[in-house]
Amino acid sequence: MAQLSRKRHVLKLVDPLTRFKSIGATKFYDPKQPVFALDHDVQNKSDKNLTKYANIEKFAQEHEIDFYPAGRGIGHQVMIEEGYAFPYTLTVASDSHSNMYGGIGALGTPIVRTDAAAIWATGRTWWQIPPVVKVELQGKLPVGVTGKDVIITLCGLFNKDQVLNTAIEFHGGEALQALSVEDRLAISNMTTEWGALAGVFPVDDATIEYLRKRMRRMQLTHFENKNLPPLAPGEKFKHPRINEDTIQALIDNPLRPSPSASYAKTLTLDLSTLSPHVSGPNSVKVATSLAKLEQKDIKINKAYLVSCVNSRATDLRQAAAVMKGKKVKEGVEFYVAAASSEVQKEVEESGDWDVLLEAGAKVLPAGCGPCVGLGTGLLKDGEVGISATNRNFKGRMGSPSALAYLASPAVVAASAVAGKIAAPSNCDISAATPKFTIQDTKPVHSDLDDSSNGQKPEVLPNFPSVIQGELLFCPADNLNTDGIYPGKYTYNDDMTVDDMRKVVMENYDPEFVNIVQKGDVLVGGFNFGTGSSREQAATAIKSRAITIMIAGSYSDIFKRNSINNALLLIESPELVNDLKKEVGTDALTKRTGRQVEIHVAEGKVVVTNTDGTEKLYKVGALGKSVQEIWLANGLEGWVKERL
């Protein structure tokens, strides 16, 4: 376990409250550490949901926790606006897009809800220190090309897990100076989709000016902020986190990488060679130039300018500039939600919000919605949507038979007007060929062995030394959490374990539940469990009486959820590649007939083939920390034992 250092802030809501109480905690280790924000299911006005929100607010008041109600905005945006995510701090959130804080120079990385409860109670959680990748940006973006195009291009160019579970440092001198903080936030946000644990930009003149602008803005809106104390007569406003003193401290005490720093990989990208790109359909790892897609005449049914990646003031202004004097195409629904109430007020004052409304935009509350498959405007069977969101997994924004594309706000706005995927009239979409390089200096891998001292790991009492079962093969790479546990169930608090058993893998393979058997050893592909931080992806698999999984590699967020919920994980790229070759990848789920023995302390997997032959695979042993958490039936039990 590692003590959180520097400033620490944890974000989010429902499950951590339940877990906090269930572990027997009665007080917070540090009430100034957490921040509560209600943002995901804000369109749900049912008595049950409103009661839940009221209980969360009451809980926050009782423990003197900073609280932001539904409608204030998406938690990540609030964390930036209110200075909780501040340069040179470690800022975590129980949401996978907490990488976004890297755009302001904070180390932002996701935790899961059980982690949040543990931190609240003890101030501690665990991490494996990741490899670090250097991304060197060169040149300057052409007119009309945005930060969203940068990260879409990076996801498409380096789509073979080159940065999986790494921390990314962005470098670039003049190239960085030309990138606004809003663009940096968008890029950092979607390093999640790229597979990284964090994506951090340096603190420079642009960062300082952004903070000063925010400070001046808050001086005007101080009396609307219920989390700040009222001013005494004659007292001048000074925000507790974003003020001249804290900003000057950044200038006086800069943090920079050591000139001798070593990196697992170094990637370079020439920004001047980029053009607008679009992700999809239904995959962030497929990026196509807008020029090529425009030629295909792809009609759309819905367009979205929502979510934490691209609904800030600059994004809304870019969309308004495209739509001014125009109307949304008949038959197209165009949904808009500001990232926060502060953002909405700013663009209302500038007149850009009215431009969007006059064009025919349908307004949603400041918060999450269609991006996570909740509320109004979801994609229906066979529909096509283009969105300025960060994720377009199959079924995430509605029907699994719909097609979803991702693009910049300006492209989404132009497409809403044209009724098809289209470029803004003032944008040069000449299909340039991006110039990039990649240099490996160290192998990037992720294992679950926490014993690096060369000694043979011990097997703790009552932990099984050998686990046996039949290999059940789901060969897909990048199988995301929406495929494992659909988003539409995530905020249904009435889902029982038996309910979860019936819907696990529903968006990936509806037949999975009819094929899986008790005691199977599930084998996945590479980057298994990518995507959302929903804990149910791990617990739903566990609900099928699966004790242990094997995959070529895992998304770190799924790994955290699994370890925290006592689902054991092993990585064996060799075994996965053998199964792909010998069993095949045509079936989404296939019983292999192959028996396996996993010797957890020896770090070996023995597979008995259908002809009786055996093959040995060396893997990382499950170390003491993982065993301890498993024996306690998860991190919640581990914390309870220590309170």
Image (cartoon, helix red, strand yellow):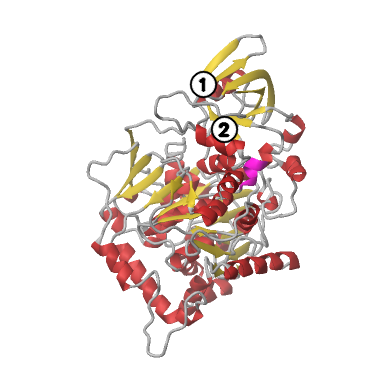
Question: Residue 627's spot in the image, x, y percent?
Answer: 56, 33
Question: Residue 32's spot in the image, x, y percent?
Answer: 47, 64
Question: Bounds of the magenta span?
Answer: 535-539
Q: CA distance from mark 1 to mark 2?
A: 15 Å
The residue lying at 65 percent from left, 64 percent from top is: 330
Q: Nearer the viewer, residue 225 or 354?
A: 225
Q: Is residue 503 magenta?
A: no
Residue 363 can be seen in this image: no
Residue marked by disc 2:
569
Question: Residue 431's spot in the image, x, y percent?
Answer: 41, 47
Report whether 587 appears left or right of 554: right
The residue lying at 77 percent from left, 32 percent from top is: 514
Residue marked by disc 1:
602
Please rate how many residues cluster around mark 2, counting C-alpha atoms within 10 Å: few if below 14, some from 14 to 19, many from 20: many
586 is higher (above) or lower (below) than 87: above
Q: Secondary structure at mark 2?
A: strand
Residue 306 can be seen in this image: yes
Q: Nearer the viewer, residue 472 or 371?
A: 472
Residue farthest to the top, as pictured = 612
Say which quarter of the image contains residue 476: top right
Q: Nearer the viewer, residue 524 or 11?
A: 11
Say which quarter of the image contains residue 167: top left
Q: Is residue 536 magenta?
A: yes
Residue 12 numbered tag: none
Q: Secondary structure at mark 1?
A: loop
Q: Amino acid at mark 2?
A: Leu
615 is higher (above) or lower (below) than 413: above
The residue lying at 55 percent from left, 64 percent from top is: 36
Question: Residue 248's spot in the image, x, y percent?
Answer: 27, 68
Dominant secondary structure of the magenta stretch? helix
Q: Amino acid at mark 1?
A: Glu
